[in-house]
Amino acid sequence: MTLTGACEYTAAARTAAPARPAQSPRATGSPTASPHAPATPRRFDEAGFEGDLRTATAITDRFWRRHWTRFFTGAYRSPRVVGLYDGSDPAATPTCGGEPLERDNAEYCPAGDFLAWDAHLMRSGYANGDAWVYLVVAHEWGHAVQNRLQRRLVSAAAELQADCLAGAVLYGSAADGDLTFETGDTREIVDSFQVIGDRTPWTRPGDHGTASQRLQAFSRGGARGVPACFT
Ligand SMILES: [Zn+2]
């Protein structure tokens, strides 16, 4: 089972979807954006994008730090967050085990225990709704969690398990009061899985599963929490 380079968000980066009003999971207490943005192409919200990335990273780390001992033995260690990289520039692309990270992908690198995401991928997805960055960050963090567990706990369907963990983190953070789901977020998540799901169902390690399998895994984690990702 490979964790690095297995996520393959490339389809999302290629998809040029129309801009839609931003309605994202939002950290409680952060400024509220206009709930009804005009239905015309809008300028890319750079500050919002960077803020959402910071928030997604912070709440995901906080969730695992807060709840780790409820589910697992040992102490939680945060992975390093390298964050955005420019995958179009080889000189600016981080390496993992000697290999450059993939263009238009988001990855957890077990060799370096770090997380990184291609800026073009993240911005392309964000243009369709900011739930995207929360989903990608929480999913990749799920791979860092898998790498901290005994191998027997890591599902052969590692990508679906990472989706399940992402659901557990985002809904769990909402239950903790760290995150508020707003109108449109659920739709954005469904749309995101439509874009990044495989065309064929999961049959072997490395497969991601279809959009509906991925959404189902995410929803299972969201509804029943972390333990549901280990059954
Ligand atoms: Zn993945």
Image (cartoon, rainbow, N blue to C red):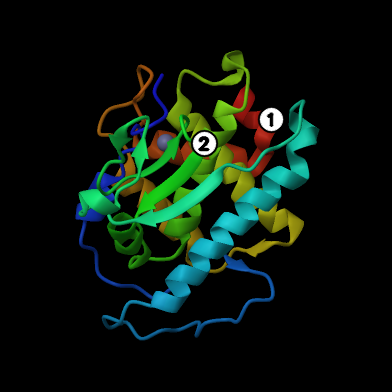
* Residue 3 to residue 84: above or below: above
Task: Using the image as rendered, state which of residue 115 and residue 140 is in the foreground.
Answer: 115
Whether residue 95 is visible, yes or no, is: yes
**Horizontal side, residue 172 vs residue 25: left or right:** right
Label 1: which secondary element: helix
Dot 1 amino acid type: Pro
Q: Is residue 87 visible?
A: no
Image position, residue 50 (x, y; %): 46, 69
Asked whether the beta carbons under mark 1 and mark 2 sit within 8 Å of each other, the answer is no
**Looking at this rendering, what residue extends furthest in the right direction?**
70
Name the residue located 54 percent from the left edge and 63 percent from the top edge: 54
Q: Which mark is residue 113?
A: 2
Exactly how many numbered labels are in the figure? 2
Residue carrying label 1: 227
Q: Quadrant of residue 20?
A: bottom left
> Local crowd at mark 2 within 10 Å, few (<14), some, or many (≥20)?
some
Amino acid type, callout 2: Asp
Give the vertical position of 84 relative to 195 (above or below). Answer: below
Q: Quadrant of ligand 1?
A: top left
Q: Position of residue 211 (x, y in %)?
A: 36, 40
Q: Is mark 2 within 8 Å of ligand 1?
A: no
Q: Residue at x 40, y 41 (%)?
A: 107
Q: Counting residues from the N terminus, which is met first, the one under dot 1 or under dot 2?
A: 2
